[in-house]
Image (tube, helix red, strand yellow):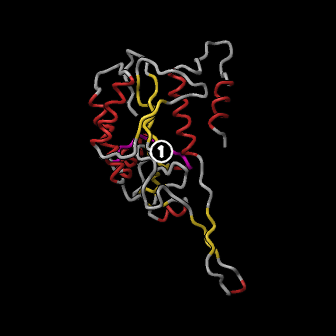
Amino acid sequence: MLSDDELDRRLRDSDPRPGEAATDPDAPAATRILARVRRNARRRRRRTLILVPVLALTVAGVTGGTYAWVAGDGEGHTLDSTGLTCHGPDQGDAIVTFDPGTENPVRKCRQRWQEMFGEPAPSTLTACVDSSQQGSIVVYAGGREQCGHHHADPYLGPTREQLGLSHFRTDIKAHFAGRTCIPYPEFRKVVRQLLAEHGLTGWKSGHFQTADKEPEGPCAEISYYDEPEKTIWLGDHKAGDPITWP
């Protein structure tokens, strides 16, 4: 598993199209790409299964034992409420955006199934929280037993904090609707106000950096939400371009 520094170095050293103009690795576009790469990489990192010893069984002289896993927060809640994976046929996956405040993961995957996988959705779908480090929501074909088969737990819905974050995301997008350049000080001020308004205690904003520290640009945007760390990462935005809200 690569560290962040190793990931930075490899991205900087790689050039899939030699001879053509490459994107500046310190440019805002590269920063946003790197943020998304890191987020996807965290989703794919698997947690180590935990061997839980139990009372030794005397049947045929075999010692008993069982395996457990840590899925999300261990209580049926995801650690990444804005991401949803629909697990399709032949191990195919489709990652779709998701709002826990207004959407149901099973219903969302069912609505998109034909479009994503080219076949009707199965009669039964089940939402689980997987045991990746990110603790994402995954919808599987089948019943609740599918969660255990995939080292996951049944998804029990959003936490109160995740509902508050959902409302925050809606409100900050509405607050800056139509804007194409929002200075960092203004952005941070509104972030603080809305965090307090929605009861998101302990949350903060930070300036996303590549390996080489760089000053903030004239315009800001949200790169991604790190829910376990309660951090809203801001990155540079190019003035005049529409803002893409994660």
Q: Quadrant of residue 218?
A: top left
Q: Is residue 153 depicted above or below 168 in this figure?
A: below
96 in magenta: yes
Q: Does 181 sit left or right of 14 as displayed?
A: left
The image position of residue 86, as x and y in percent, is 46, 48
Magenta-highlighted residues: 91-100
Q: Secondary structure at mark 1?
A: loop
Instruction: Report the residue at 38% width, 43% height from top.
Output: 98
31 in magenta: no
Q: Is residue 29 depicted above or below 43 in this figure?
A: above
Type of amino acid under label 1: Glu
Instruction: Report the residue at 60% width, 51% height from top.
Output: 46
Q: Does 219 sit left or right of 92 as displayed?
A: left
Q: Is residue 78 depicted above or below 40 in this figure?
A: below
Q: Which residue is mark 1?
A: 229
Q: Quadrant of residue 157?
A: bottom left
Instruction: Report the residue at 31% width, 33% height from top.
Output: 172
